């Protein structure tokens, strides 16, 4: 089959919609369940490239959680500790394989933005991963294979309409890709730049310390940025993204957005948050929303009389600004990546406030000296890759 009719295009009014192979070859994927739409498959194919490259670069199982053609989170399959399990709502005693841990961590990077995500796995989807996904709001999944038990579980989601896509892992796209905009065809070479440790050799700061864990996190940041709508900045900690700032016109806004997400990720581990007692039967999305509001300046929306009773078993104390600052001041060892150069030192200053110890970016700004000076001031290790990673994600289609 070289053509597949889609549910609809970007919006329900955009019909008909289809994907097809221009060269007449068979489609390199199979829909095992559901009927995906246009954006679903854009998410699927971009997220698959991300996790495939992460696996190639690190040798570890990788997963991503995509929304609207950018990653909400990406992670490698390292084990979860007990705090991770509580923060990511892992059922007590649940079986956890490496690929399941990868997806749980990817989704946990930004649970609010992962609502209704597209999941991507570098390895076969097993029953442990499917069992976790079954309890989350998600639109679909792409993987190179599925166990029989996993497929049976996934087919029960969304009343049997959950999208399950299997991609041929041997498929490679044509060297040229095309897209039409306003009836005009654009053509460019496929972005096949290889991201590996050879990009991390040019350390431009006084601090040259770069442990293996930071190298791994730099690769994770760079590969994530490659498949994120530009401009983009990514914060990574312990082999998972903790904040992705995508699609902003100003780079400092990307850095602030991703930094705020990273702060919220860390604040979810605060003892007061872990101690929140929710009413029985509350849905996971409602719990995620409540935590997000609780951590915000609008916390009264969930703590006011008449509101908290619908969420919590007992009214929690507010997490004060002083408590937040004290908790965030403990954050260290974060890696920050940028898809293009930081034009000013203010990006470094903001990254430092969210625990940045390592920065990786292309370099090439006329103000590189100011950026390097700012990093030196805070003892940050910074590598210049010389490689820009701009992405117009909607163009990454199969050709």
Image (tube, rainbow, N blue to C red):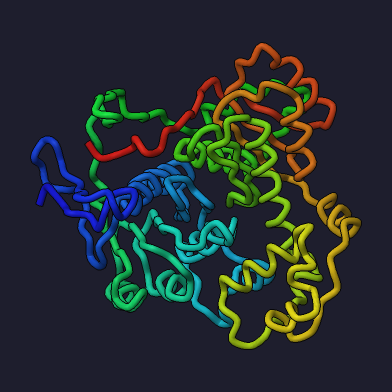
Closest to the observer: 316 or 330? 316
Closest to the observer: 392 or 13? 13
From the viewer's perspective, tell me whether residue 395 is left or right of residue 374.
left
Question: What is the total number of numbered labels drawn onto the structure image?
Answer: 0
Q: Residue at x 63, y 88 (%)?
A: 280
- In this rendering, the answer to whether 313 lies above or below 66 is below
- In this rendering, the answer to whether 182 lies above or below 105 is above
From the viewer's perspective, tell me whether residue 28 is left or right of residue 81.
left
In the rendered image, which quarter is residue 119 located in?
Answer: bottom left
Quarter of the figure with the C terminus:
top left
x and y percentages locating residue 330 in the rendered image: 83, 52
Q: Residue at x 34, y 37 (%)?
A: 396
Check the image and name the residue furthest to the right: 322
Q: Is residue 28 visible?
A: no
In the rendered image, which quarter is residue 335 located in?
Answer: top right
x and y percentages locating residue 184 in the rendered image: 25, 24
- In this rendering, the answer to whether 279 lies above or below 392 is below
- In this rendering, the answer to whether 232 lies above or below 376 is below
Q: Residue at x 22, y 50 (%)?
A: 15
From the viewer's perspective, tell me whether residue 339 is left or right of residue 383.
left
x and y percentages locating residue 93 in the rendered image: 56, 82
């Amino acid at each position: 089959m070289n053509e597949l009719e889609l549910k609809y295009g970007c919006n329900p009014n955009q019909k008909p919609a289809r994907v097809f192979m221009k060269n007449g070859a068979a489609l390199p994927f199979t829909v095992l369940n559901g009927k995906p739409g246009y954006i679903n498959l854009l998410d699927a194919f971009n997220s698959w490239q991300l996790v495939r490259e992460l696996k190639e670069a690190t040798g570890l199982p990788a997963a991503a959680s995509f929304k609207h053609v950018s990653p909400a989170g990406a992670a490698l399959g390292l084990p979860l500790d007990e705090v991770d399990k509580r923060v990511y709502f892992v059922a007590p005693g649940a079986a956890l394989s490496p690929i399941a841990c990868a997806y749980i961590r990817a989704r946990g990077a930004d649970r609010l933005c992962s609502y209704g995500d597209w999941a991507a796995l570098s390895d076969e989807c097993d029953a442990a991963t499917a069992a976790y996904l079954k309890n989350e709001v998600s639109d679909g999944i792409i993987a190179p294979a599925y166990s029989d038990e996993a497929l049976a579980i996934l087919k029960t989601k969304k009343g049997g309409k959950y999208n399950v896509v299997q991609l041929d892992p041997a498929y490679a796209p044509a060297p040229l890709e095309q897209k039409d905009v306003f009836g005009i065809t654009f053509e460019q070479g496929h972005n096949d730049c290889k991201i590996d440790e050879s990009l991390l050799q040019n350390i431009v700061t006084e601090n040259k310390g770069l442990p293996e864990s930071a190298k791994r996190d730099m690769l994770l940041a760079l590969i994530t940025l490659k498949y994120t709508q530009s401009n983009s900045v990514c914060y990574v900690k312990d082999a998972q993204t903790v904040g992705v700032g995508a699609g902003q016109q100003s780079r400092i806004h990307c850095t602030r957005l991703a930094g705020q997400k990273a702060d919220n990720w860390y604040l979810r581990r605060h003892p007061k948050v872990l101690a929140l007692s929710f009413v029985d039967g509350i849905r996971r999305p409602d719990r995620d929303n409540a935590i997000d509001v609780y951590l915000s300046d609008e916390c009264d929306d969930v703590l006011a009389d008449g509101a908290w009773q619908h969420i919590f078993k007992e009214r929690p104390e507010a997490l004060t600004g002083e408590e937040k600052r004290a908790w965030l001041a403990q954050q260290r060892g974060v890696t920050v990546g940028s898809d293009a150069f930081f034009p000013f030192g203010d990006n470094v200053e903001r990254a430092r406030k969210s625990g940045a110890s390592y920065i990786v970016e292309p370099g090439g700004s006329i103000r590189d000296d100011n950026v390097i000076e700012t990093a030196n001031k805070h003892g940050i290790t910074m590598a210049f890759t010389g490689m820009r990673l701009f992405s117009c994600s909607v163009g990454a289609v199969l050709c």
